């Protein structure tokens, strides 16, 4: 599919016609396989990605191999955090990584920044993305502070299942441990308890919600 077809299919009800034309003019259509890093922490932000299909993960990393899951990006979504850093001409403080095969459009930062002054639909789009992602981040903070690990694990599985629209998610125990910032042993204990309660079924590198 060409960029103009994608813009027409995905954004005709979101952006005004002139902004759609600029998307067709400046956006670059890209593809990425699972685990491909789209935006890296502490790197200059040269473009803003908008996901067309597939799922990407947004994470915070400390440069020492530690990280925590922030939220997913899927169809027609972008990272409001990345845009905010780009507006201030700062390096990225998040990592965006492909979780599945994804298609996305990459828009040069200078072009994106100019849209805030030119197009009300872009401002509305950014504010909606920012509101949704901020709400999710507040939930993450609340869960870490006030909820037990079993609650957090089950919520993570349910949310991931919802994003992929599948009851089975292809995740290792290590993946959950890394994303939730807890030990692999603790994740294994919780998953075995959930399986015993017939809430999930565990397979080789996969978890199924019953």
Image: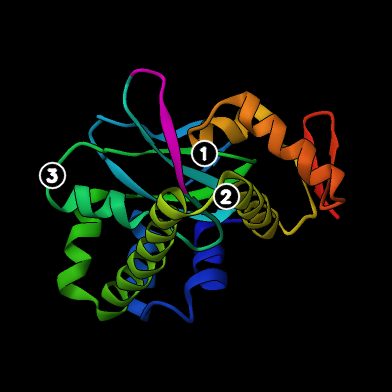
Q: Quadrant of residue 161?
A: bottom right
Q: Quadrant of residue 207?
A: top right
x, y (%) of residue 111?
23, 56
Q: Say which of 47 and 2 sits in front.
A: 47
Can residue 68 be found in the magenta stretch?
A: yes
In the image, 54: left or right of 131? Answer: right
Nearest to N terminus: mark 1 or mark 3: 3
x, y (%) of residue 48?
34, 49
Within 10 Å of disc 1 (Cα), the crowding (few <14, some 14-19, many 20+) is: many
Q: Secondary structure at mark 1?
A: helix
Query: Quarter of the image containing the C terminus?
Result: bottom right
Q: Secondary structure at mark 2?
A: helix
Alpha carbons under labels 2 and 1: distance apart = 8 Å
x, y (%) of residue 60?
37, 37
Query: Quarter of the image containing the N terminus?
Result: bottom right
**Eye-nearest disc, 1 or 3:** 1
* Residue at mark 1: 180
Alpha carbons under labels 1 and 3: distance apart = 30 Å
- The dot on residue 152 is 2
In the image, 105: left or right of 16? Answer: right
Query: What residue is at 37 percent from the left and 73 percent from the top?
Result: 128
- The dot on residue 89 is 3
Q: Say which of 192 and 170 sits in front.
A: 192
Alpha carbons under labels 3 and 2: distance apart = 35 Å
Q: Say which of 53 and 6 sits in front.
A: 53
Nearest to N terminus: mark 3 or mark 2: 3
Give the magenta-colored segment's residue range: 64-70
Nearest to N terminus: mark 2 or mark 1: 2
């Amino acid at each position: 599919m060409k960029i103009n077809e994608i813009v027409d299919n995905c954004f005709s009800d979101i952006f005004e016609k002139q902004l759609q034309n600029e998307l067709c003019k400046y956006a670059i259509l890209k593809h990425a396989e699972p685990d491909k890093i789209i935006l890296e922490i502490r790197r200059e932000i040269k473009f803003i990605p908008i996901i067309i299909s597939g799922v990407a993960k947004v994470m915070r990393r400390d440069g020492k191999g530690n990280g925590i899951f922030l939220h997913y990006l899927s169809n027609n979504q972008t990272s409001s955090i990345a845009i905010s850093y780009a507006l201030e001409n700062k390096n990225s403080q998040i990592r965006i990584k492909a979780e599945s095969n994804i298609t996305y459009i990459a828009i040069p930062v200078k072009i994106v920044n100019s849209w805030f002054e030119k197009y009300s639909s872009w401002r509305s789009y950014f504010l909606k993305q920012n509101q949704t992602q901020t709400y999710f981040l507040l939930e993450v903070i609340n869960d870490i502070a006030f909820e037990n690990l079993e609650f957090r694990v089950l919520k993570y599985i349910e949310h991931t299942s919802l994003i992929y629209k599948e009851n089975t998610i292809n995740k290792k125990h290590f993946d959950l441990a890394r994303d939730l910032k807890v030990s692999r042993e603790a994740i294994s204990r919780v998953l075995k308890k959930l399986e015993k309660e017939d809430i999930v079924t565990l397979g080789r590198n996969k978890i199924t919600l019953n």
